[in-house]
Amino acid sequence: WSVSAMIDRTRFPAQGFAGGQPGAPGAFRADGEPKAPKTVVYFKPGSRVELSPPGGGGYGDPLERQPERVLHDVVEGFVSIEAAAREYGVAVRFLGEPGQLVRMPKHYEIDWDATNRLRSGSTRPE
């Protein structure tokens, strides 16, 4: 079997604008080894392939994004709870049970005290 990985920006991620962060670079790997994009690569049965399309650059300072919008992005699965704190300075709590498969919007809330600390820079995660 073969894969034609037509992905861009594997070496140089998209740049952000107006204070936004750069996007994630794209990647093409097979069995854990990087492969050249924009080529046809042939594989043996049982090979594992990872295609990661690149992410777009951000717009504006992520610390100025409204916390409620970041919460919405977490609920929709666009941003992880960890990335909300690390990238946006918004502490989101999951109120459900560990391992819970069905997660509703009501299962998430903003921890405003922690968010204020994160955004003031006093406890910004690395």
Image (cartoon, rainbow, N blue to C red):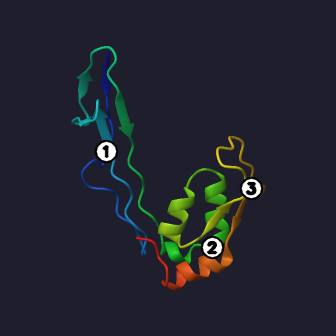
Q: What kind of residue is marked 1?
A: Asp
Which label belongs to residue 107?
A: 3
Q: State the image quarter where residue 56 is shown.
A: bottom left
- Residue 114 is situated, as x and y percent measured from the top left of the image, at 61, 77
Q: Is residue 6 above or below residue 109?
A: above
Element at label 2: loop
**Who's the residue at 75% across and 49% down the image?**
104
Mark 2 and mark 3: span between their CA atoms?
Answer: 19 Å
Q: Of callouts 1 and 3, which one flags the residue occurring earlier in the amino acid sequence?
A: 1
Which label belongs to residue 36?
A: none
Q: Of callouts 2 and 3, which one flags the residue occurring earlier in the amino acid sequence?
A: 2
Q: What kind of residue is marked 2?
A: Gln
Element at label 1: loop
- For disc 1, the marked residue is 8
Mark 2 and mark 1: span between their CA atoms?
Answer: 31 Å
Sort mark 3 into few (<14), some (14-19) or many (20+) by Cα contacts within 10 Å.
few
The mark lying in front, picked from 2 and 1, is 2
**Who's the residue at 48% across and 67% down the image?**
86
Q: In this view, does 18 lie above or below 72?
A: below
Depth check: give the residue in front, 91 or 96.
96
- Residue 41 is situated, as x and y percent measured from the top left of the image, at 24, 24
Depth check: give the residue in front, 57 or 90.
90
Q: Is residue 48 left or right of residue 115?
A: left
Sort mark 2 into few (<14), some (14-19) or many (20+) by Cα contacts within 10 Å.
few
The mark lying in front, picked from 2 and 3, is 3
- For disc 2, the marked residue is 66
**Who's the residue at 37% across and 36% down the image?**
51
Q: In this view, does 34 lie to the left or right of 98?
A: left
Residue contact between numbered discs 1 and 3, judged by CB atoms under 8 Å? no
Q: What kind of residue is marked 3?
A: His
Q: State the image quarter where residue 94 is shown.
A: bottom right
**Who's the residue at 65% across and 80% down the image?**
113
